[in-house]
Structures are given as C-alpha cells and as structure tokens.
Amino acid sequence: QSALTQPASVSGSPGQSITISCTGTSSDVGSYNLVSWYQQHPGKAPKLMISEVSKRPSGVSNRFSGSKSGNTASLTISGLQSEDEADYYCCSYAGSSTFGVFGGGTKLTVL
Amino acid sequence: QVQLQESGPGLVKPSETLSLTCAVSGYSISSGYYWGWIRQPPGKGLEWIGSIYHSGSTYYNPSLKSRVTISVDTSKNQFSLKLSSVTAADTAVYYCARHLQWAFDYWGQGTLVTVSS
C-alpha cells in the first residue's frame, strides 16, 4: 500500500479539465511544500511536471498546474489533449526518517 | 544536457546481490544535487529506494534500508546501487535520477532487473 493515496483512474474529454488528488497525512503532504508530480507514458521514464507543489519546470505546458490544501495535493490539467493520456504519480517529502514517498499512480484516459 | 544511464545485470538469482551503476553526463556529480534510485515493479507504481548527496551522505527507504547500499564515485561521475538478499519481489525496472527538493528532474531510461533462478 502506497503512502500517498491517488485515485486509480480519471478520465476526461479533449478540451476539458481534470484534477488528480494526492492525499497524504500531516507527516508528509501536510507538513512540507515538497510535493512533485510526474507523467509517465508506457515504457518510458517518468517526466517531472510540477515541483514544490506548484512550480512548473521549463518546457512543461502551462495547462498543468499544482496546488495543495491541508494533507491533499492536486494536479490539474486544463484543455485536455490526447497526448496527456498517461499515468501520473505524486511524490512528497515525509520527514527525516521516511524521506520520500510516492503515490500509487493515476491512469488518465482521454476519451 | 544532463543524461543518466543505468547499467548492470538484467538477471539476478534469489538471495544474491543486485548491483547497478548510473553513469551521469552533462553535469558533474560533485557540483551538487542529490542522486537517487527509484524502482517500478511490472505493472505497478514507483518506489523510492534511496539517494546520495554529492558529499556522500546517504538516505534510504526505511523498508529497504537493511539491504541497500548507495555509493558515489565522483572520479567516474557515477553512482551505484547494491541491494542484497533479493527475492522475486525485487523484480522491477530500476531508474536512477537527479533530484533537489524532492523533485526528480532528470531520469535514466530504466533497466529491468529480473530475480529468478
């Protein structure tokens, strides 16, 4: 069982917006602004999409945004495109004993 | 452009030690950042294994700590993973990656390691 909880799957139609949640605890997501999000296409390495809750690395589309409220972080993708269909993972720092934890992953389907 | 490349045996026998190396190009490990290992069992999610700072300080997943050793060789600009007493549950694609503030910005392509006799 993953330390961070994500929905197994989400779906949306092209042009729509979707949000993927990542629920942790007060020991990880709730305590640190060190949540990152990754996109992974089949057979490929993960790609960093969001760092430090809401920072978008250079080259990542501004259709991707991140936020956090309490123990839950969220990734929002606006203007869905077919190439957004992939698995998405969140990751959070969890303190100086546990260090880093990933979510179980969410499969995004673009209908 | 920062590039990372994993290398090592693709097949390891149960109870033996898995050894992988990550060669880094386009950036000197000595310049900073953390360097980590992440694995992904077939069809499953990502699991952080451990990381090493350029100074040699190491940080391990508590669930794997007793079996993991990560080391760095700055002269070769590479870092390595050793995982002892492997079982079939350790079968996975193993990735190396660079990170800072728990954001992994550059990843290797990954290498599949199968544990089987």
Image (cartoon, rainbow, N blue to C red):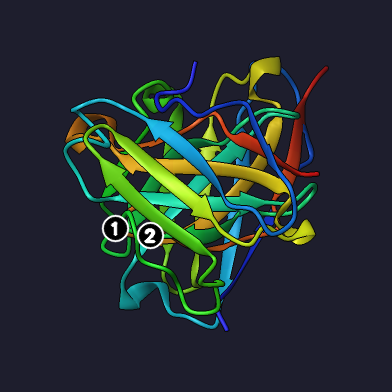
Position of residue A40 relative to residue B45, above or below, is below
The residue mark sitting in front, 1 or 2, is 2
Q: Which mark is residue B101?
A: 1
Same chain for the residues under marks 1 and 2 in the image = no
* Residue under numbered circle 2: A51
Instruction: Give the x, y percent position of residue A77.
Output: 55, 55
Secondary structure beneath dot 1 equals loop
Q: Which amino acid does label 1 sit on?
A: Gln
Instruction: Give the x, y percent position of residue B44.
Output: 67, 28
Position of residue A30 relative to residue B31, above or below, is above
Instruction: Give the x, y percent position of residue B81.
Output: 52, 44
Instruction: Give the x, y percent position of residue A41.
Output: 74, 51
Q: Is B42 left, or right, of A88 in this rendering? A: right
Secondary structure beneath dot 2 equals loop
The residue lying at 79 percent from left, 47 percent from top is A42
Closer to us: A2 or A22: A22
Residue A23 position by quadrant: top left
Closer to us: B24 or A12: A12
The residue lying at 51 percent from left, 43 percent from top is A19
The residue lying at 43 percent from left, 79 percent from top is B28
Closer to us: A84 or B51: A84
